[in-house]
Image (cartoon, helix red, strand yellow):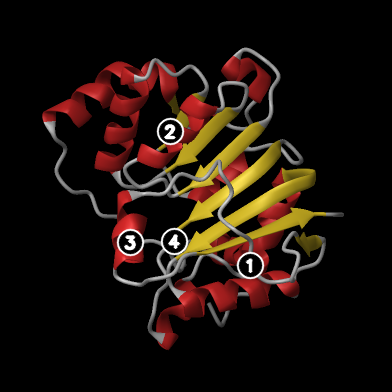
Amino acid sequence: MSRFKSEEEARQAGVYISKVKSFVKREGRLTKAQGKALEEQWPHMGLNIEQGLLNLNEVFGREAPRVLEIGFGMGKSLVEMAQHAPQTDFIGIEVHRPGVGACLADAADASLSNLRVFEHDAVEVLASCIKDESLDRLQLFFPDPWHKKRHHKRRIVQSDFVQKIRSKLKIGGHFHMATDWEPYAQYMIEVMQAAEGYENTSSDGVFVPRPNYRPITKFEVRGQKLGHGVWDIIFKRVS
């Protein structure tokens, strides 16, 4: 893009500029149950970016605390959180279609009414569909750490991204991250400590104990048995 001053200028010139993605989209194969859930449950629980800026009170039919999770995987923990907090509304974003199908299937089995999902890129969803100061908590659990140094630019936790999140959180709202990769945990802390408008909720200024609302996944239990750690990081929006 060296000869263009911005993406908009390049677009007007008819030149497409590819963007660095923080994820790799893995289509995978849908099981019959996942496909059935997508077909039957999407009209009730699915959200589309084409809907534009959402009125969440209309989406859920009530006024309630709102939690958004980026990259919910197969959705097990997200469904569990929604089950255990019926007074709270949850929005999940995932690009892996089988994971979306699995989440919808489990949500239907649990008869949840407080969960909605997007199958789309989170950055675009935040920009186009989520109003400023509308979220009480934003969750980012076990994102891809992109281990190799040359791939660090693909990490979703970047200074510009955390400011986009900040605008969507209410004052006092929390940005909760969790990772099982210690170098990424340290990197997250560095990014967040330098970010304007945030305050670490940890008593020692680093990590926090796992909150009761975050379920322990099978993956996490397996890691703990192998001696692997998990680091929870929660920053509060203060301005």
Q: Which residue is at a point 58% across and 65% down the rendered structure image?
A: 7
Q: Which disc, if any, is residue 104? A: none
Q: Secondary structure at mark 1?
A: loop
Residue 123 visible in the snapshot: no
Which residue type carries mark 4? Answer: Pro
In the image: residue 132, left or right of residue 59: right
Name which quarter of the figure residue 99 lies in. Answer: top left
Rendered view: 185 above or below 112: below
Q: Dot 4 corresponds to which residue?
A: 143
Name which quarter of the figure residue 58 lies in. Answer: top right
Name which quarter of the figure residue 205 lies in. Answer: bottom right
Q: Dot 3 corresponds to which residue?
A: 24
The disc, 4 or 1, on the residue closer to the chain's N-terminal end is 4
The disc, 3 or 2, on the residue closer to the chain's N-terminal end is 3
Which residue type carries mark 1? Answer: Phe
Mark 3 and mark 2 residues within 8 Å of each other at the beta carbon: no
Distance from label 3 to label 2 (Cα)?
Answer: 26 Å
The disc, 3 or 4, on the residue closer to the chain's N-terminal end is 3
Mark 3 and mark 4 residues within 8 Å of each other at the beta carbon: no
Q: Dot 2 corresponds to which residue?
A: 80
Residue 25 visible in the snapshot: yes
**Which residue reaches farthest right?**
239
Query: 149 or 204, which lies in front?
Result: 204
Which residue type carries mark 2? Answer: Glu
Rendering coords of residue 115 (x, y %): 49, 26
Q: Dot 1 corresponds to which residue?
A: 207
Rendering coords of residue 220 (x, y %): 36, 57
